[in-house]
Amino acid sequence: MHNVKRAHSPEVSRRGFLTGFILWVSAAIGAIITVPALGFFVSPANKISTAEKWIDVGKLADVKIKSPTAVTFNIKIKDGWVTSETAQTVFIVREDEKKYIVLSNQCTHLSCKVAWHPDKNEYICPCHNGIYDMEGGNISGPPPRPLDRYKTKLDNGHVFILVKE
Amino acid sequence: MEEKQNWLQWIAERIGWEAIDKAMLTRKVPKVNWAFTLGSTTMFVAIIQFITGIFLTMYYSPSPDHAYDSINYIMNDVTLGWLIRGLHHWGASIMVILVFLHMWRVFYYGAYKYPRELTWILGTFLLLTVLALGFTGYLLPFNQKSYFATQVGSSMAGVVPVIGPYLKRVLLGGNAIGALTLARFYSWHIWFLPALLVILMVAHIYLVFRIGISAPPVFAEEDEEA
Ligand code: HEM
Ligand code: FES
């Protein structure tokens, strides 16, 4: 009796089976589209170049002591299907005859460009009033750390810095 | 399992799922054959075209200086770019083939007759929209083949009596294929025509649900058997 009953009312009905089957097949088709599409979507984020390059930023002798000097140069960047040049600015700072550093002009708070104000002897960020001293150390405002320094080398009186391409 | 059911039921109750289910999924249909799935297949490919097309706009650049290079970038540098573009590329041709097969099925079974004339008329506009999508999409890679296909297609518009030359200028956005042509073909291809396609598809399929699908015609001897 028990067996007969089971045979006539299976736990999974024909309709239930087909509904489930169609849902699973649909989900599989959805995944076949979604997974490649996600890879496609995030693709450029996974292709960041780590190449570095030494760039000549001028003669050290041209920079006055204790007077940070902004130097602008162009670097080539590959931007998708476009190769373009973008300008980048750094500060060469001579502390004395021998010692010098090269600072990035990019604020360590949220990446605005800082400017050197000779009258105040400070770099000031226009965005949220971040203030740095001549060597890039923090004076006040929101920036969490000093201005970044480039790796440098001196060759034939010229300053070279290592920049990311 | 128990909880999930309740959660689904909660939504089902609020959106009136029962009525949707009755009207669309568990509605009664006559005994038909595989040829009656061609419309749904076309709709499925249309959805694939929408998805892959939307993704392609993330890298494609509709300017004469960049169109070709941006397509190369998709094919060679973007993760699975060849696949997404390949689906869209082949899907376009498959869609045209499917629309014709579907139309022939409807014609063969006489399913265009009363009360389904409007379904057929909307269908003819769907056919034209699909062809227009194919034509405008063909220019976008901006290679030799695209260029001359557009040259040929727009020259055909140019020989329409009286308004032909003007029609051609409207189509191209000027006298020759250039930046304006590419920009407007892109605009048609990604905005005007897909919007039109969605509106027509919704209306077309609404009528299919409303009127119900036609049963295959019954022949004399089968009739006696029944
Ligand atoms: C994007 C293009 C189209 C889509 C997505 C589409 C979709 C559909 C779907 C899902 C059905 C339900 C029955 C079936 O699948 O056979 C249908 C029926 C129908 N279609 Fe289309 N269709 C398209 C183009 C056309 C064209 C070009 C025509 C004719 C000029 C047409 C005429 C009809 C007619 C008359 C019916 C009713 C058939 C019946 O009740 O048996 N459709 N369509
Ligand atoms: S970005 Fe420089 S202070 Fe906020």
Image (tube, rainbow, N blue to C red):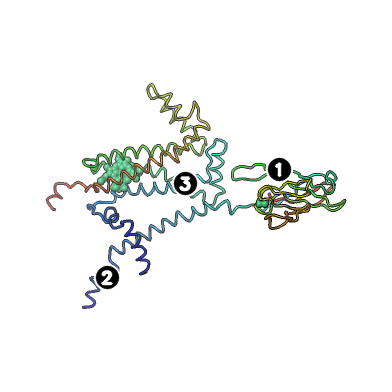
Is residue B101 visible to the viewer in this orientation of the structure?
A: no
The disc labelled 1 sits on which kind of residue? Asn
Q: Which mark is residue A74?
A: 1
Residue at the spot of label 3:
B54
Q: Residue, x 42% and y 27% (percent of image)?
A: B167
Q: Chain letter of disc 3? A: B
In the rendered image, the residue lying farthest to the bottom is A1
Residue at the spot of label 2:
A10
Q: In front: A139, or B45?
A: A139
Residue B118 percent coordinates (x, y): 26, 39
Residue B62 percent coordinates (x, y): 52, 38
Q: Secondary structure at mark 3?
A: helix
Q: Chain letter of disc 2? A: A
The disc labelled 3 sits on which kind of residue? Ile
Q: Chain letter of disc 1? A: A
Left or right of A31 in this view: B102: left
Disc 3/disc 2 C-alpha distance (Å): 45 Å
Whether tag 3 and tag 2 are in contact, CB under 8 A, the answer is no
Q: Are marks 1 and 3 on the same chain?
A: no
Disc 1/disc 3 C-alpha distance (Å): 35 Å
Query: Please, is residue B219 above or below residue A5 in the view?
Result: above
Q: Are marks 1 and 2 on the same chain?
A: yes
Residue B21 percent coordinates (x, y): 29, 56
Residue B116 percent coordinates (x, y): 24, 42
Query: Please, is residue B96 above or below residue A11 in the view?
Result: above
- Density class for disc 2 (Cα within 10 Å; few <14, some 14-19, many ≥20) is few
Query: Is the CB atom of the residue marked by disc 2 within 8 angstroms of ligand 1's nearest atom?
Result: no
